[in-house]
Image: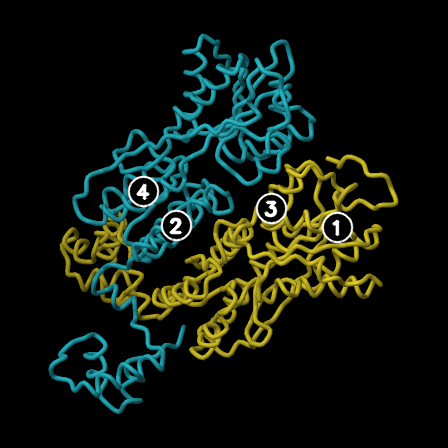
Chain colours: A yellow, B cyan
Amino acid sequence: MIKKTSLKDIAQAVGVSTALVSYVLNNQKENRISKEVARKIRQVAQELNYQPNQIAKSLKTSKTRTLGLIVADIANPFSSSMARIVEDEADRQGYTVVFGSSDENPQKCQKLITTLLNRQVDGLLIAAPAGTESQIMTLQKQTVPFVLIDRYFPSLKTSYLALDNYQSTYDAVRHLVDSGYQRIGLITLKTSLFHITERTRGYQSALQENGLPFQKSRVKELSGNNPTPDVAKAIQLLRTGQDPVDAIVFTTNSLTFWGLKAIKSQHINLPSELAVVGFDETDAYELFDTSITYIRQPLQEMGQLATKILLESLNPNTPITQTNLKATLVIQASTQSLSVPAVQSAE
Amino acid sequence: MIKKTSLKDIAQAVGVSTALVSYVLNNQKENRISKEVARKIRQVAQELNYQPNQIAKSLKTSKTRTLGLIVADIANPFSSSMARIVEDEADRQGYTVVFGSSDENPQKCQKLITTLLNRQVDGLLIAAPAGTESQIMTLQKQTVPFVLIDRYFPSLKTSYLALDNYQSTYDAVRHLVDSGYQRIGLITLKTSLFHITERTRGYQSALQENGLPFQKSRVKELSGNNPTPDVAKAIQLLRTGQDPVDAIVFTTNSLTFWGLKAIKSQHINLPSELAVVGFDETDAYELFDTSITYIRQPLQEMGQLATKILLESLNPNTPITQTNLKATLVIQASTQSLSVPAVQSAE
């Protein structure tokens, strides 16, 4: 236990009663206390570095000015950048953020929700793992203020802030088709997470609406358990056989990273031998030989807006807000048009 | 405010007194309450998802089973990996971690310390920014349990867990000398942070103890405010003039990243035109054309051990523990020996 300066310590130092110290520090009965004594009490409180007990205060106001944030994995750059943005925005509004990683595990997510509620957070921001619908429904029944971030369940009527995932890959495939690529593969995760399956749906629609066949064999769904060899094998499979792909879209930042590692070790030349679209912005792309075309999520806007929506929803009867933000396709050398000769990537 | 199930709600649902509900849920007066009534109360409590008020509990026990962690910047991979390791270790011991980023700013660090203490954390792990000695001394006077992590102040007698920073760059320079490099530059931050100045000291000693001159012009200290152009310019300066360097050691992961970006855009061939030693392990290195020799910090050990030491020091009168862990030099293609012809990096 942290030994802190108590009202009693101050009372003893000044030589007055504890009650008097409490009145002064809580700005009560001001007219009945001499200004000189009040000044002395405040001065000693400052000298002894007195800090009011936030927990005791919380019990009275039932507000802790703390938000809970549940990310997928704080060690993933998407999660840590998001945490930083939420933290900064919350700080601007006078809130502290308590966070934890769900590890894409529903049990761990439930444990975190329970812990955070026990710590009396005022509200929650949750990047919900697959299989947590019932947890979210329970929160809603308990009227806990929360906003889903990055992921959401279309069957549940909850506030969320997420990407327009369908459109993100639709636009990427459309760009590849416009650049002359016709045999486009997709490397994605085997998951029921809506934000990921939407990315596959966007890929499929873009092919079909642009007169290209959708071939199931061109979609590789990986478990994510054994990523480096699995992604390398998926790329190899897509590029061999009777009908090799000329382009690959990756649906997450980790898949893109593992894919680029495999492309490097297989000595595949981008874009002359293969065009590539990555997902998310990460520092790592900048060290890759060819500059990578990627789908950029509006992280800053997503984190700030989600925090603002959560803070608004701390007021009772705030209506549900559902927002899908648009991604930007950052076009670089890895998807250069087939109609112009491939050159070295620009710096 | 989160509306939670109260003891009164349960009492009304079962049709008993609130006191009786309290006795049952706190395992009191067991012999005096009928098993059937106790069972019913527990069942209703579960159905209504009753959660004991952690804040009220905390007031009684003065323990919150929460640790505070102050990192430099949660968006930096070193900080976020560390946060994840601390979080996992704390979780294993039944503790939750509340975290925040100091942004290398003493004022922000003080604000975080105050916030965390107000939230009644049981103890603190702090990666202390420059200029926070007085804050750390105040914590010590208040007998707040804390452990400094990654950074520490040699003039203060506090528990810490950090790298042997001196030895880390000493070993890197020694390896370069052994590989035939003789004109070795250093790119570092302009800072009074002890863990960084120690890295410069290790570089200097290794040169002198290996019969090479220490030249101040070969040490470039950057502010970090305008990193991409500043690092590019530093590399250019080190490589031009009468006595160009044949090797560069970087003292942080960010400096290494910016340096590799500049090396890529300046089309410098590693190691034939320049040998490079990076700091820390980051994913980004794996996408760079040449595999990079780097100084690996024992992050896992550092995070776990710091958490364990903090938990031990929650007991009164625990002695101070000061530990410097050894780095490992991971030798790859970017520092290949000059006596063998340079080849492509191995995959």
The chain that hosts pointer 3 is A
Q: Earlier in the sequence, mark 1 or mark 3?
A: 1
**Image spot of residue B347 (x, y percent):** 59, 34
Q: Give A119 or B270, whichever is nearer the viewer.
A: B270
Three-letter amino acid code at disc 2?
Leu
Q: Are marks 2 and 1 on the same chain?
A: no
Three-letter amino acid code at disc 1?
Gly
Tell me if A162 is positioned left or right of B301 in this view. Answer: right
Q: Give B7 or A31, whichever is nearer the viewer.
A: B7
Which residue is denoted by mark 1 in the rendering? A241
Distance from Cα at disc 4 to Cα at disc 1: 51 Å
Which residue is denoted by mark 4 in the rendering? B305
Dot 2 falls on a residue whose secondary structure is helix
Q: Quadrant of residue A149?
A: bottom right
Dot 1 falls on a residue whose secondary structure is loop
Q: Evaluate if marks 3 and 4 touch, with contact meaning CB atoms under 8 Å apart.
A: no
Q: Evaluate if marks 2 and 4 touch, with contact meaning CB atoms under 8 Å apart.
A: no
**Image spot of residue B125 (x, y percent):** 34, 45
Dot 3 falls on a residue whose secondary structure is helix
How would you rate the neighbour count of disc 2 (Cα within 10 Å): few for under 14, some for 14-19, many for 20 or more?
A: many
